[in-house]
Amino acid sequence: MPIVKKHLFHAGALRDYMIRVLESAGVSNTDAAVSAEVLLSADMRGVESHGIIRLFPYYSRRLRQGLINPHPTLRVVNETPAVLALDGDNGLGHPTSCRAMEHCIARAQEAGAAVVTVRNSNHYGIAGYYAMMALGHDMIGLSFTNASPLVAPTYGRTAMLGTNPIAVAAPAGREWPYVLDMATSIVPIGKVTVYEKAGRQIPYGWGIDGQGEVTTDPLAVFHGGALMPLGGTAEMRGYKGYGLALLVEILCGVLSGSAFGAGVDSDPHNRHSRIGHCFAALRIDAFRPLDAFKQDMDALFAQLTQSPKAAGHERIYIHGEKEFERSQQALHEGVPVMAEVVRALIADGLEAGVPFDLEPVCTIEEVEV
Amino acid sequence: MPIVKKHLFHAGALRDYMIRVLESAGVSNTDAAVSAEVLLSADMRGVESHGIIRLFPYYSRRLRQGLINPHPTLRVVNETPAVLALDGDNGLGHPTSCRAMEHCIARAQEAGAAVVTVRNSNHYGIAGYYAMMALGHDMIGLSFTNASPLVAPTYGRTAMLGTNPIAVAAPAGREWPYVLDMATSIVPIGKVTVYEKAGRQIPYGWGIDGQGEVTTDPLAVFHGGALMPLGGTAEMRGYKGYGLALLVEILCGVLSGSAFGAGVDSDPHNRHSRIGHCFAALRIDAFRPLDAFKQDMDALFAQLTQSPKAAGHERIYIHGEKEFERSQQALHEGVPVMAEVVRALIADGLEAGVPFDLEPVCTIEEVEV
C-alpha cells in the first residue's frame, strides 16, 4: 500500500480558517461556523473524504459561482405535530441540516418521534453529524441524504443513484454511543481514486465498467462505469444495497419534493444541486425508561465485543467506536490533513484571497489502507 | 441446480387449512385468520421459507407446548402522540403485529408520523406484510424484527444477531409500490439448507465456519459457524450489514424492552422467545401533496428501469415487483408448495389431528435457484 504524508493541525486553527473562507464567499459568521464545525468533525473522525478537502470544490467555489445561496431563508412547506417539510432555499447543506435536525428534536420532545425532510439543499457533509445531534437529548437520531448519481442499479450499467448514506446514532450507558454512518454503495468514489492514484487494481466487486461487467480497473469505473451497491453482485445480494439506496432516494428526493435519481446535482436545466435530506428523532423515554435502555445497550455491546473472535482478529467493534477514538486523538495530537490536500488548500486559498497560512503541529507518514 | 417438485393449491384452501390447525391449537378464529393470511402471503409472494412451511414447527407446535400464549392481551406500556410501546403478552407474532401496525397507522394519521414497538412477541413471518399495510392509507410503512442469533459480527465467529429484516413499502402511481423486504444477512439460513440438501457448495462469502473463516461448505455453517452480514467480508464492507443488523436489534430488542442479541429465542432461563418488533408509518401528505409524490415515484422508477442494462441482462427491477407478479400468478394458477413441504404437512397434520387433505390443482417441476 502507498505511504501517505499527513500534516497535523490544531482543530481550532482549521475551524477558524474554514470560517474565514466561507465568510469571504459571502456566508454569515453563524452559518460559516456551522459548516466549518461539520467539515472539521469529518476530518477528526477520520472521514477525510468529507472534510476540509471539500471546502473549496464543494462549497467556497460554488458559493462564488452563485450556485449556492449564501443567505438562504429556510421555509416551512408543510407541518403536523410529528412532521416538518422544509425548503432549504439552495443554502449550504450544513447549517440548513443542523436547523432541520434541531426542529426534528424539538418535535420529538413533544410528540415522542418526528421526521423532517428538506428539499432544495446542497451537500451536507457527513450524515452522522446530524444523527449524533440527537444523542445529547437522549434520543435516537437518523439522517439520510441523496447525492449525485454514482451507483448503478442491479443489472444496470449506468450510475443512477447517489452513494446515498444512512446514519443512525443511539446513546449507550458507559460505552460510546452506537453511530452507524454508511454509504449504501460498497465504497465511496474517493476510495477508488486512492487505488487509481496508487496504480493499483480495486478489489473485485466494488465497481463495474461501461458494459456493466465487474471490473478491477479503477479507470473503467471512472470512464462510463459505476460503483456497485452494498452487497455487490446479485449472487451476493447487491440488490439489497440497491434497495437501500432507493429507499434513501425516496425519503430524500421524492418525499421531500426535491430532485431524485439522475436529476440530483446534474439537471442541465437547473444549476442548483437540489439535493434533499431526511432526518428523524425518537425520544427514548417515550418508549421505556432511559436508564434501562442505556443499560441494555451496554449489555448488547458487551455480548458482541466479548464474543469469540475470528482467526487472526483480536477485536470486534461497535459502529462509531473507532471514530470516537480517532476524534479524541485528533483533539490531543492535532487533526491530520493529507499533504496533497494541504497543497490544494494553499493554491485554492491564494486564488480566493484567503491564504492558507497555518503551521502544522507536526508531520506524519501513514500507510493508506 | 436441483429440480424441485411443487404442488399448486387454491389460496383459499391453504388459508382455511392453516386456520383450522391454529384453531385446534387453541387460537381464536380472528387471530388464526390473521396468522394464516400472513403465512399465505409469503407463499404467494414466493418467499416460501416464511410461509406454510413454518405452520407446525414455528407456531402450532409451540402453541401446543405452551411456549406461545394462544389468548394474549396486547398491553400499552407507554405512549405519546407519535409513539406507542406495546407488550405482546407472548402471543402469536402475526395478529400482534397487525394490531401494532394498525395503531401505528392511526397515530400517523393524526401526528403525520408514528413509531410503535412491541416486546414479548414471537416470529411474525415476512416483515414486508406489515410495511405494506401502510400502502392502502397512502403512507410509507416500515417494519423490523429481531430473531434467533444466526449472524456473526465482523471479525467474530459466533452467531450473535438474527437475520434481522428491514422492510419498507411506499406507494407509487401507475406502477407497483416499492416494497423492500430484506434480511440484513446476505442470505437466510434456509438458502444454505437448499444447497446442503442438493449436495452443493455455497458461494464464497455467504457463511463462515467455527473458526470464523469464510467457507463454501454448508455443513460448516450449521455446525458452529454462522451467516455473514450483508456485504460479507470486511473488504466488501460486511460491517455495514453487521451495522444494519445491530440497528434492527437496537430498535426491536433494546428500545422495545424485549430480549436482544444472544438472548432472543434462546435464553435458557426463559422458554418464551421474547422477540421484539418495531413499526413506523409516515403519512405522505403530511410532507407534500400525494399526487405529486406518486408521480415522482413513477418517474424515479422509469429512470431506473429504462436505464441501460448490463451485458447479458434485459430487465432492471424495482423492489417488490417480482413478488407482486408472483402473487398475481399464484392467485390465478394456484399457490406453489414444495412436495417435500406437503409431505411434512401430511405427517404433522396427522399428529395434530388436523389431516392435510387438500387436493392440488396441479403439480409442476421447477429449477431451484
Image (cartoon, coloured by chain):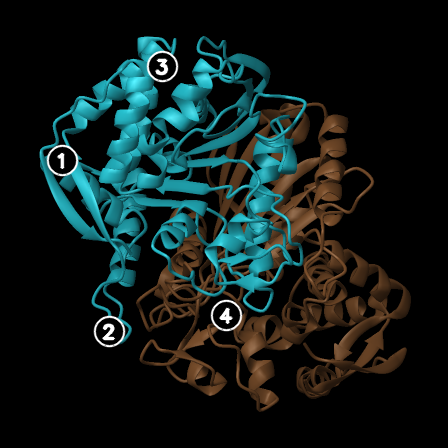
Chain colours: A cyan, B brown
Give the residue type at disc 4: Leu
Q: Distance of mark 1 from mark 2, alpha carbons?
A: 31 Å
Q: Which residue is mark 1?
A: A334
Upstream in sequence: badge 1 or badge 2? 2
- What chain does mark 1 sit on? A
Res A31 label: 3
Q: Distance of mark 2 from mark 3, alpha carbons?
A: 47 Å
Res A364 label: none
Q: Distance of mark 4 from mark 1, alpha carbons?
A: 57 Å
Q: Nearer the viewer, mark 2 or mark 4?
A: 2
Give the residue type at disc 2: Gly
Q: Distance of mark 2 from mark 4, alpha carbons?
A: 41 Å
User: Whole-percent x and y of residue A323?
Assistant: 26, 45
Can residue A301 be seen here? Answer: yes
User: Do callouts 4 and 3 mark residues in contact (Cβ within 8 Å)?
Assistant: no
Q: Nearer the viewer, mark 4 or mark 1?
A: 1
Q: Secondary structure at mark 1?
A: loop
Same chain, marks 2 and 4? Answer: no
Q: What residue is rendered at 85% in x and 64% in y? A: B329
User: Whole-percent x and y of residue B17?
Assistant: 77, 72
